[in-house]
Image (spheres, helix red, strand yellow):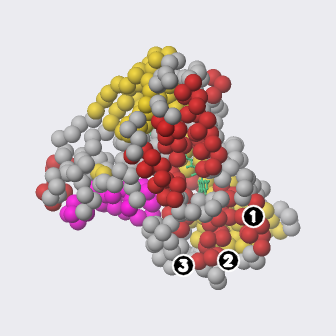
Amino acid sequence: MDKKTILVVGAGISGITTAIEAAEVGHEVVLVERLPYLGGRVAQLGRYFPKLCPPYCGLEINFRRIKNNPRVQVHTSTELVSIRGDRGAYTVELLQKPQYVNDRCTACGACVEVCPVTRDDDFNYGLTTTKAIYLPHEMAYPYRYAIDTSVCMKLECKKCVDACAYRAIDFSRQDQRFEVKVHSVVLATGWTPYDATKIENLRYGSYRNVITNVQMERLLAANGPHQGLILRPSDAKAPESIAFVQCAGSRDDNHLPYCSTVCCLASMKHALEYRERNPQGKAFIFYIDLRAMGRNEDVLSRVKADENIVLIKGKVARIDEEPCGSLVVEAEDILSGLKRKEKVGMVVLATGMTPNLPALDKVVVDEFGFFNAEAVEEGIFAAGCDKAPLDVSSALKDATGMALKAIQG
Ligand SMILES: Cc1cc2nc3c(=O)[nH]c(=O)nc-3n(C[C@H](O)[C@H](O)[C@H](O)COP(=O)(O)OP(=O)(O)OC[C@H]3O[C@@H](n4cnc5c(N)ncnc54)[C@H](O)[C@@H]3O)c2cc1C
């Protein structure tokens, strides 16, 4: 067999899948991830459809496959800087941010106790904070602490260095640039939630109890801010009712003109889980169209069967806050023609997915910023949400196909 080396950029579920599939049939893979841990946004989900299992059901098996396969070289905290050359013979330049915490870290936590700096926890989408030295999350792979260099005082403070009994923290480390020769490149850099502060009438960022769907995933997660209890940000009380606002920015020419595919199902999942955990609670879903793609039609049936989940076809026009933190959501119900005002304890905005592709000469994007496969030379491919918003099972199929393309490339 003609052994190839393939660069995979991004170690979410798509990049991991492409890497494993290519390596397990004998090819060399260089897998780079810009964060200190693997798993991408799936690691941040509470439970995922269709089977509603926790994300680590799927991720852990894949981490083990990577760990046991000497043909996969993993570089965390690393980004792709440039791609030179042509099909079959690319030279890629990679930049690894300093890994101040090394393999000696046992994750004992002594460093956290002495660290004086606090930061927003990006894993929990800002719902909680961590210290500047932090464990990304308790299932993180690799399992070791990381340092947020944008806030850490490094050698000016160095309390963590003194507290670490294993000499695992070394602030003398520098950025490392290196080059690799590869046969083909697969971009799997995934997606970022649309910035909800841009949708002014929905008041994200102004009212604390207006949150986004990705934050709701964290609230529902067993390893989330309240171990799976849904408590609202303003007063940590369980909301008696929640409004889910669909297409928050999506299918809107002023924001994201396209449908993000998964948001309807995500909100239906959220409403069902909220009702499971709060049997007295009431959920309202304001939608334009309800789309339950793939094998998930039963989710919509379960939603319709629950009399305490109210489906309202109408776009939310405004949200007002009451002094107690409750919110009044206003929309025109287009099926009845009546204006509706619902007072709820919390609002969840179903914001869409925006592409994350690196801005490089050889990476050509379409009008929405997703990978434009038709305009790119053979040899550079994209997997999963780099092409379009996808659910996990579609991303997996695509990523497996891209392993084959990259080998042929
Ligand atoms: C609210 C919500 C709920 C959802 N729930 C479900 C569900 O229940 N079931 C389901 O099937 N799907 C669900 N999804 C969709 C699911 O999250 C995606 O299908 C999945 O994340 C796609 O994985 P990916 O690997 O393509 O992208 P990502 O998960 O975004 O992974 C991309 C990886 O690339 C890394 N990266 C980015 N840029 C660079 C760079 N320049 N260099 C190196 N690395 C980089 C990122 O850090 C990340 O690790 C949900 C989506 C939303 C918005």
Q: State which quarter of the image contains the C terminus.
A: top right
- The x, y position of residue 30, in whole percent, is 41, 33
What residue is rendered at 64% in x and 76% in y? 275
What residue is rendered at 43% in x and 50% in y? 64
The magenta span reads 109-138
Q: Is residue 323 above or below residue 44?
A: below
Determine the CA span between mark 3 and mark 2: 12 Å
**Mark 3 and mark 2 residues within 8 Å of each other at the beta carbon:** no
What residue is rendered at 53% in x and 62% in y? 54
Does 130 lie within the magenta span?
A: yes
Instruction: Name the residue tied to disc 1.
Output: 298
Instruction: Name the residue tied to disc 3.
Output: 238
Helix, strand or loop at mark 2:
strand
| Viewer-proximal residue among 307 and 71 | 71
Q: Nearer the viewer, mark 3 or mark 1?
A: 1
Q: For residue 106, what is the image quadrant?
A: bottom left
Q: Mark 3 vs mark 1: which is more N-terminal?
A: 3
User: Residue 282 has which mark?
Assistant: 2
